[in-house]
Image (cartoon, rainbow, N blue to C red):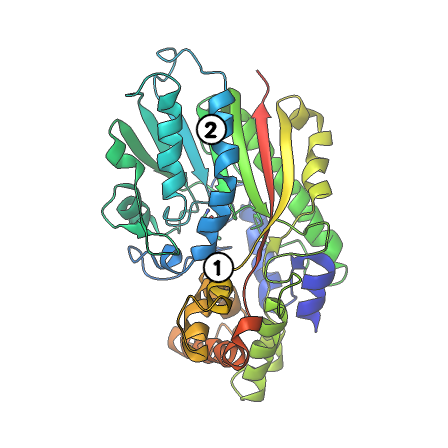
Amino acid sequence: MKFIQAVSLLTSITIASNGALAFAAVAEKSCTKATGGAGVHVPIGKDGEGEYTASTKGCFDVINTARPLVLNEIRKQTLRPFGVGSPAYHIADYGTADAGTSIGLMTDMVRAVRERGDCAQEIVVHYEDQLTNEWQSVFNHALGLKAVTDAYGEEIPNPYSLQNVFIEACGVGFHNQCYPSNSIDFGVSFTAMHWLSRFPSSLKGDEKMHAANQAAADWKAILKARSKELVPGGRFVCVNFSKNSDGYFLGQTDAGASMWDSFQSSWDQLKQQGLIDEEERMGVSFPNYYRTKEEFMEAFDDAEVSSQLKVVSIEERVVRCPYRELYTSGKSNRSARQYAEWFTPTTKTWSHSTFKSGLNADRTDEEKESIMSQFWENYMALVEKDPGAHGMDYVHAYIVIEKVE
Ligand SMILES: C[S@@+](CC[C@H](N)C(=O)[O-])C[C@H]1O[C@@H](n2cnc3c(N)ncnc32)[C@H](O)[C@@H]1O
C-alpha cells in the first residue's frame, strides 16, 4: 500500500525502488544542465502521431477554464512600445506536449493582442517542452498541417493561419531559463509543472520531506526563470495540478473510485498473474508533486521572487472528467467495454512510461510492453465492471502572475 499512502497522504507520488534510487543519483549530477528534467516524463506514441492530444480531451476543458483569465490579462496589460527591442509580441507555452490542447487558446491570444490596436501585429508563439518531446506533432498542430478537434469533435483554428505569426520551439526544461531576459510578453503553462526536475534525493524514509523539498526548490527555480524571461508588465498564467483545500487531487475527488486505487490494484494484479516480482510491484516512482495553494504562495516569501513577480490571483478549480460526464449523461453512446477503451488512454498518456520504468531493467522492451498491455487490460476490466465510477477529475490551481514594471 506504499503507493497509495504516498498519493493520499502526501499528494507526492514517490515510491521507492532500487532502480529509481540509482536513477536519482545520476539525475542529481545532471540537474543543473539546461535540459534538466529530460527523461523524467516520456511522451506517449510515436513522434508525429499526436497521440497525446487525441487522448487528452480533459486538458482542453482545463485550458478553456483558464481562457477568460488569460484574455482578460492581455486586455489589461501595458503594451510595450513595439519597435523598441523585438517588434513582435512573444507568447510562450511551457510544457506544451504536442501543442494540440492549447492551440485554440493560442489563436485567441493572437486575436486578443491584435484587438489592442495593430491588427497585423507580428506575434511569436514559442512552444516549450523537454528535448525528448513529440516535436513533430507540435509543428503539425501549430502550422495547421494536422487538424486538432476538441472533445466534441469540433475542429479548432490554429494561430499560424492568422498570418504574421511565427512558430518557435524550445527543448530546454522549464526549471531553467528558456528565453533571453526581458523577452516574453505572456507565458502560460497548463498541467505540466507538477513534474519534478529529478527524482527526490531519496525515495525511502520520510518521503514527504524529500518530495516536498524538491517541489519547493523546483517551483522557486521555475518562478526565478520566468521572472528573468518576462518583460516588465509581462504575465504568466500557470495552471498547475494541486491538492485543493478539500484534499482532492487528480483522479481522487468526491466522484467515483480513486484512480490511484485502481492503478494500484491493476498493478498488484500483475504479480498475482505471475508477470512481475515483488521488487517490480513496489518499483513504481512518479516524480510528481501536487502543491497546495499555500505551497505555491510560499515561494513569494523569497526576496528575489517577490522583488520581480506578484500574484494577481490564485484560485482552485475542479474540472470534471469529460469522458465520465459524457458516459453518465448517456451522450457517449458507448457500451461499458467501449467506455473502458475510450477512457483509459487519457490516464495512459502521462503514466505509461513511469509504470514501465518500474519493470526490471533486464527485460527486453518487447517484454515490458507486453506486461504493460496486461496492466492496461487489468485497468480496463476494472472500469468495465462499473464504468460510471471511473474517471479522472482534474484539480488545479489557476495562478495569474505579473512581472512588476
Ligand atoms: C500533461 S502534459 C500537459 C500538456 C499540455 N500543456 C496540456 O495542458 O495539455 C505535461 C507536459 O509537461 C512536460 N514536462 C515535464 N517535465 C518538463 C520539464 N522539466 N520541462 C518542460 N516540460 C516538461 C511533459 O513533457 C508533458 O508534455
Q: Is residue 188 found left or right of 253 in the rendered image?
A: left
Q: Quadrant of the N terminus?
A: bottom right
**Amino acid bearing label 1:** Pro
Percent across and percent down for residue 58 are 47, 55
**Residue toward you, 308 or 361:** 308
Q: Is residue 181 visible?
A: no
| Mark 1 neighbour class, 10 Å CA radius: few under 14, some 14 to 19, many 20 or more | many
**Residue toward you, 217 or 65:** 65
Q: CA distance from mark 1 to mark 2?
A: 28 Å
Q: Is residue 73 above or below residue 238?
A: above
**Amino acid bearing label 2:** Phe
Percent across and percent down for residue 83 are 35, 11
Q: Which residue is mark 2?
A: 186
Q: Is residue 294 above or below residue 166?
A: below
Residue shown at 58%/72% (left/top)? 389
Q: Is residue 5 found left or right of 126 in the rendered image?
A: right
Percent across and percent down for residue 95 are 46, 45
Residue shown at 41%/79% (left/top)? 370
Q: Is residue 385 visible?
A: yes
Residue shown at 25%/44% (left/top)? 144
Q: Which residue is mark 1?
A: 322
Q: Is residue 253 found left or right of 174 in the rendered image?
A: right
Give the mark toward the camera: 1 or 2. 1
| Mark 2 neighbour class, 10 Å CA radius: few under 14, some 14 to 19, many 20 or more | many
